[in-house]
Amino acid sequence: MAEIGNSVAVLGTGALGGFYGGLLAQAKYDVHFLVRSDYEQLREQGLRVDSPLGDFHVQRPHVYRQAADMPAVDLVMVCWKTTSNAALAAALEPLMKANTTVLVLQNGWDVERTAVDAVGGQHVVGGCCFLCSNRIGPGHIHHLDYGAIACGEYQTGDGLTPRLQALQAMFQRANIDLRPSADLRLVRWKKLVWNIPFNGLSVLLSSDTRQLLEDSSAAALAHELMEEVREIAAANSTEIDEGHIEKMLADTRKMVPYDSSMLVDFRAGRPMEVESIFGNPLRAGLAAGYHARKIEMLYQALSYLDREHSGSSM
């Protein structure tokens, strides 16, 4: 089996990057964190993670304000939101070695494109995180539930490569449930079955996951949106089993009440991932001859709210 190496760069030390990067650091990997607003707190106080799996404290993390100051590494984890991807190419440049793997852990469709354009598809693995986690203060992450990662090679036809097996072994040593897949497209569409209804409706209805599913009208709309994602995927030659919808709904009912990442961003006045989670899948459907009308309505409403937040207009 191939080896990945010991050095890791985490781009984005928030709810996702702080949790997974912290676990890798706890497992004695050489982890380097690119940090924005929490730099001083992390440098002086370390990274705290509260989790039902066990709280932990990374006391002296390697933290940086700029990617240019970071060393080249074996694995780069892209954990920031897609709204920051304009800075990705410049951030990746100093981190790359000949065999560096770039693991893109972002929500949406075709979100690997920026990394691929910067470093080439042979370096890129895409991943979807099934994680309930929030940043609750500077250098402080609260992991609530779940935590698995499903991932696959960006280049189609590569299948279950030795690199994916090596990633799985590496993450298992850090108690992270990473699940390789031979079909990244299927991984992404299956995650969008959840992301599109629960991110979008949470913002428009100002509700957490439990509130959405306890209301019959909201739950019915979530189900209809899930069906539209299945139909977009089918138009793009990816079949999702109908039982996947029921599993997603059942899993969401069992999880702790959770504010989606998009709702957290909206309430904080930050840009939302409208294009990656809604616009890109919608356009993929239209290009394949399928018009997802409910998703389009959600996309238009969220685009309006996002422009109102940013103060821009069209």
Image: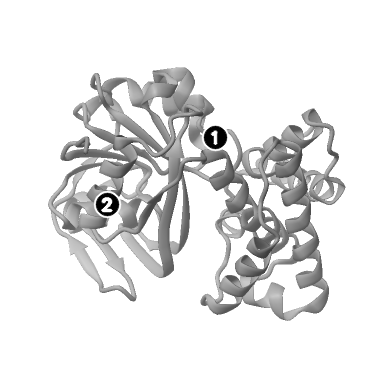
Q: Position of residue 291 (x, y in %)?
A: 85, 40
Task: Name the disc covering residue 157, or none.
Answer: none
Residue 278 position in % (x across, y down): 70, 43
User: Is residue 305 depicted above or below 88 in this figure?
Assistant: below
In the rendered image, the quadrant that contains the C terminus is top right
Q: Nearer the viewer, mark 1 or mark 2?
A: 2
Residue at image x 53%, y 26%? 113
Task: Estimate how packed mark 2 is, as few (under 14), some (14 to 19) or many (20 or more) residues with alpha carbons within 10 Å.
Answer: some
Please state which amino acid type lies under the numbered disc 1.
Answer: Val
Q: Position of residue 265 (x, y in %)?
A: 57, 53
- In this rendering, position of residue 3 left or right of residue 139: left
**Residue 178 screen position, x and y as percent:** 36, 53
**Amino acid beneath label 2:** Phe
Q: Which quadrant holds residue 123?
A: top left
299 with respect to 136 (left or right): right
Q: Which residue is drawn at 55% across and 37% down?
A: 83
Q: Determine which quarter of the picture holds residue 135.
A: bottom left
Name the mark on residue 171.
2
Report the residue marked by disc 1: 111
